Image (tube, grey):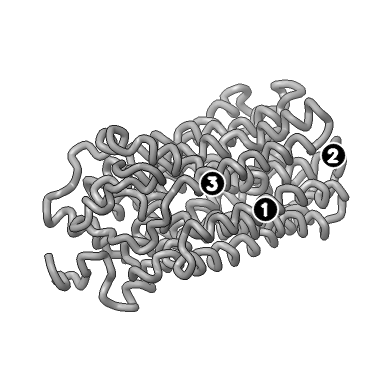
Amino acid sequence: MSGQSQAGFTPTGTIATAADRRRVVFATVVGTTVEWYDFFIYATAVGLVFGQLFFEPLGANSALIAFATVGVSFLFRPLGAFLAGHFGDKLGRKAVLMWTLILMGAATALIGVLPTYQAIGIAAPVLLVLLRILQGISAGGEWGGAVLMAVEHAPKAKRGIFGASPQIGVPLGLLLASGVMALMTAIAPGDQFLQWGWRVPFLLSVVLILVGYYVRRKVEESPVFIELAERKEKASMPIVQLFRKHLLLVIVAALVFAGNNAVGYMTTGGYIQGYATNPEGPIGLERGPVLWAVTGSAVTWLITTLIAGWLSDRIGRRTTYIIGWVMQLVGVFTLFPLVNTGQVGLLFAGLAILTIGLGFTYGPQAALYTELFPASIRFSGVSISYAIGAIAGGAFAPTIATAIVQATGSTQAVTWYLAGMTVLGLVATLLLRDRSGIPLGPDHEEEQSVSPIRGLARA
């Protein structure tokens, strides 16, 4: 297909009108914000109430068990990624995104009406974990579809900033989740929050999902997938082809994300919220001020994510990432000294410094991942690398941090753990060539199949 197709798309995946571009950006931002609000509202509730309501009868380690349920969902992300990758490469990006949105919303709303341990006994934590697993399956498929819709629609010179649009759905989701929870602690203080206040943010998901579903229905399918379908060049078994030809690339790409995700889950996984508000801990702050501090840091994360996406279009994905890893390392070493002062203002400062680095190691990720994999297996490659990186990095980061503090009585070892993960992400980035601007369409599969890993000629 040469020139422009009747749908107005070029073979390189650039859509014809600015209105179409705005619609795609808006839809990816709204959709991913809703998805990640649902995902993070659980993690926030774990740090505040779930240990008491669902796990306290299980003994002294109830907080540790509660945080472990955050990680359980990550173990099922690869299943979501496998399913979404397979069907996304065969049936299209848009259809998969509609189903991930519905699945996430249904699971979140059901948590909002779930009886506690006191009401139904051991069935309560079991059902809670099952619903969290459904959230994990949805999250495993969501990210890859959203970033491909954004980047494959983008002009060549703006892939970084277009790709950052679904990326800001993560800090926006955190901002919304923390903000709504903070509001509910004011509306329903003390025991009221434990009795019913925590449920409202979960039930609000129903409204948000309806909005996200409506917005996504209006978006056109990815032009790269349309061209693959017209040419009948879709891979019959994309996942098999991915692991047979690109296994090492999947591992390296996963390690890039693991370095970001381990650190990011100190806030998005509920650890800082639980650590700072634990009445038996060293700080013992009120829930509301801590949640507002996390909400403020989400704004910093959002802004730096957009800046990093924009910058990667000018200096390349790899260079932007390297700058980000250095900044993230600074944030890791300043986090706990500021948090442990017990002053809300300094707690916010620690989180804000940390999220500057997080933004720079997250903003370029959508464009970086999209440019790593050939068109015919791109959804599978992007989704599975992301899911494996999430397990290696963030799945049990809050649980590991909780266990370290319980064992040592200090947060110093947690700092070194997060620093080690940051360095791991840096090393993985240094192994990759910069492929900024590589053609994305199926015409260029041969060029796309040259390995992005330095020192290798083929995938």
Amino acid found under the numbered disc labelled 2: Pro
- Label 3 or label 1, whichever comes before in sequence order: 3
Q: Nearer the viewer, residue 411 or 122?
A: 411
Residue at 34% of width from left, 59% of height from top?
149
Give the position of the C terminus as an image quadrant: top left
Residue located beneath label 3 in the image:
39
Q: Residues within 10 Å of mark 1 (few under 14, many from 20)?
A: many
Q: For this view, does 21 lie left or right of residue 251?
A: left
The image position of residue 162, as x and y in percent, is 42, 66
Residue furthest to the front in view is: 455
State the count of labels: 3
Q: For this view, does 434 lie left or right of residue 444?
A: right
Q: CA distance from mark 2 to mark 1?
A: 18 Å
- Circle 2/circle 1 CB separation < 8 Å: no
Residue 210 seen anywhere in this rendered image of the structure: no
Residue located beneath label 1 in the image:
181
The image position of residue 102, as x and y in percent, is 40, 48
Residue 279 is marked as: 2
Q: CA distance from mark 2 to mark 3?
A: 25 Å
Q: For this view, does 82 lie left or right of residue 350?
A: left
Amino acid found under the numbered disc labelled 3: Phe
